[in-house]
Image: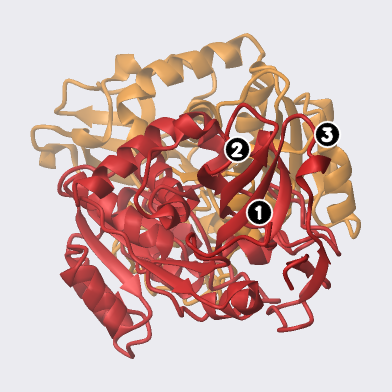
Chain colours: A red, B orange
């Protein structure tokens, strides 16, 4: 309805998988008003909502790098928003920029959650702010360059390689001169990795011959493993690690929905092969985001990194199912929801 | 017998635990002769034999940091030997020094396996060459200082803390000003750690209240975890890790004899807490051994590090049972076998 703001909140903490219609619930509330803005706040409308594997973790009431989403609170998300009204020097009405406005059509946000508009590189696709030059692109950037540190000629293996982070991580390793092997969940995704993104090899982990093909694709073993998946793929990679390999522990999507988490059985390889396994959170590099976004935007402009997005239409109504499908690998590249086309009229 | 050399060889690769009398077998062979020495060789008699958790791994026919011991070959070990005859400039008859002569009374060894005698600090107890200033002391030194990097005020937790490596690792962390918590397998060992070695706390992992006591002993969580044990203790430590904790993966004795290795279930904490888990092998630091031995010997002389050894008498005949008992935690400090008292007469 024109006078109402549609949003999605966390209703119940899932034990294992997210349960459609139970974990998250929808509600309509009055639209926020520009006259309610206080100093340092902005009124925004959301254009795109990012769906991320990390969302499952934010639903757990456990110690983590961010507090859990509270029951009844709108679900957290990275978003791209248009500013409708502003009492902040950081952005003015009409500006389109990345925000953390959550699963809502409209929101009043504090400007502590954004950077000044001129620190974001200009883009022709606003959705880039959620993908290559958004959090997933930055995650790939810092994880690969600061922890993986690939050198020319290194063998770099990326799991979840057709996803938002993995696809950029692999392309960055290629820019550093590495031989890059991707692991993904379908033959189509693998073909995209090798034909479009220039990966040297890609393997479908659902292939019955996956372990053998994995060995064959890593004849010189593995110098850098950029892991988004965990579980059996991580175990295989441990078994193929070269001495002094760097394992970038970025995600473990195979385990996020599990009530019986499987630790890496090949863990003792960490000793015998002197592996460094290091976890990280992209927010730790926040002071360097402006410079990194600039470099990523330049690579994108020059065609050195290719964008790929899976954009779900249908607004916030389809977001929960989209998130459930994310863990099934529905997406190639960055998965997001179009909450409102940048050209559609505003309710406000 | 006076004319015979007694030794122990690997007869069969164990599937899980070492089987007394089956995994290792004994044999007598003719004594080596000084007149058979070639250039670059030394004839030695072994005084002390080191028993190390790593020995179980050397019995496996898998890719590792050293080749497996071959079936029929004398079992590998660090030893302290007296030189009886030498065609090497590195040591002369009468010298006592650390060697890798294996489970044998006498051996002809290549001088590539030793350093020149003057690179070893002089000791009053030759057994120190297997403990504080031997491989286990060096393992503690490089693992703690290069990977753990404890700072004053850090909470450092050491598992296997009453063992040869753990006890030195904890003492080194104390020298760096850290608060040190040890985990060991008996109340007596825990009392030794706090009363004799100056650990700030020690917890018996066999205590039914171990998880609660572990939490209480780490009120500021864990900055450095020096792990010799793996398994459930590693999982507990992951659950208590502070952001950016360093996990020194030195050993996993709880898993060495297992045919069904348990990976760390709390592995995803590596991401949320940005943990660096790093494995290492002391041999990687070989170029720095001379300087490190000198520093360790000085700390020992000054009483800053205390030695503790469990020395089994009875010669090589008791070594296999000693090794089996090592995995049960028989020892406090360094476990070794006296093959021959330094003052007993030689067969040669």
Furthest-left residue in this view: B39
Q: Could you tell me which chain the residue with mark 2 belongs to?
A: A
Residue B2 appears left or right of B326: left
Query: Which of disc 3 and disc 1 is earlier in sequence?
Result: 3
Compute the Cα span from label 2 to label 3. Answer: 45 Å
Residue B201 tag number? 3
Mark 1 and mark 3 residues within 8 Å of each other at the beta carbon:
no
Say which of A27 and B249 sits in front: A27
Q: Is residue B267 above or below residue A65?
A: below
Residue marked by disc 1 = B234
The residue located at (16%, 47%) in the rendering is: A177
Judging depth in this view, the residue of B30 and A161 nearest the camera is A161
Q: Is residue B231 visible?
A: no
The image position of residue A91, as x and y in percent, is: 57, 34
* Same-chain status of marks 1 and 2: no
**In this rendering, would B90 be left or right of B173?**
left
The residue located at (13%, 32%) in the rendering is: B40
Q: For the point 35% across and 36% down, which residue is it?
A: A294
Q: Which residue is mark 2?
A: A114
């Amino acid at each position: 309805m024109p006078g109402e703001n549609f949003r999605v909140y966390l209703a119940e903490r899932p034990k294992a998988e997210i349960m459609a219609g139970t974990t998250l619930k929808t509600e309509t509330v009055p639209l926020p008003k520009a006259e309610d803005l206080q100093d340092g706040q902005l009124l925004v409308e959301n254009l795109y909502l990012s769906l991320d594997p990390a969302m499952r973790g934010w639903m757990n009431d456990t110690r983590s790098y961010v507090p859990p989403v509270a029951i009844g609170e709108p679900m957290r998300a990275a978003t791209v928003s248009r500013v409708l009204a502003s009492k902040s020097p950081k952005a003015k009405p009409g500006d389109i920029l990345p925000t953390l406005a959550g699963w809502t059509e409209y929101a009043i946000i504090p400007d502590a959650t954004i950077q000044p508009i001129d620190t974001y590189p200009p883009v022709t696709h606003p959705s880039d702010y959620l993908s290559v030059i958004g959090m997933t692109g930055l995650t790939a950037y810092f994880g690969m360059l600061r922890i993986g540190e690939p050198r020319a000629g290194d063998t770099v293996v990326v799991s979840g390689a057709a996803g938002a982070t993995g696809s950029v991580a692999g392309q960055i390793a290629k820019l550093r001169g590495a031989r890059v092997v991707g692991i993904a969940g379908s033959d189509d995704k693998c073909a995209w990795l090798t034909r479009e993104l220039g990966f040297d090899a890609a393997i479908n982990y659902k292939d019955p011959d996956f372990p053998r093909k994995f060995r064959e694709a890593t004849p010189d073993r593995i110098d850098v493993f950029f892991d988004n998946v965990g579980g059996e793929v991580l175990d295989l990679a441990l078994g193929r690690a070269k001495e002094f390999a760097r394992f970038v522990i970025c995600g473990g999507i195979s385990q996020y929905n599990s009530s019986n988490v499987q630790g890496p059985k090949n863990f003792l390889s960490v000793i015998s092969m002197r592996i460094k396994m290091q976890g990280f959170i992209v927010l730790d590099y926040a002071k360097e985001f402006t410079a990194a976004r600039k470099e990523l935007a330049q690579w994108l402009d020059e065609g050195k990194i290719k964008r790929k997005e899976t954009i779900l239409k249908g607004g916030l109504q389809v977001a929960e199912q989209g998130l459930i499908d994310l863990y099934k690998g529905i997406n190639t590249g960055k998965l997001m929801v179009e909450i409102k086309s940048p050209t559609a009229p505003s309710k406000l």
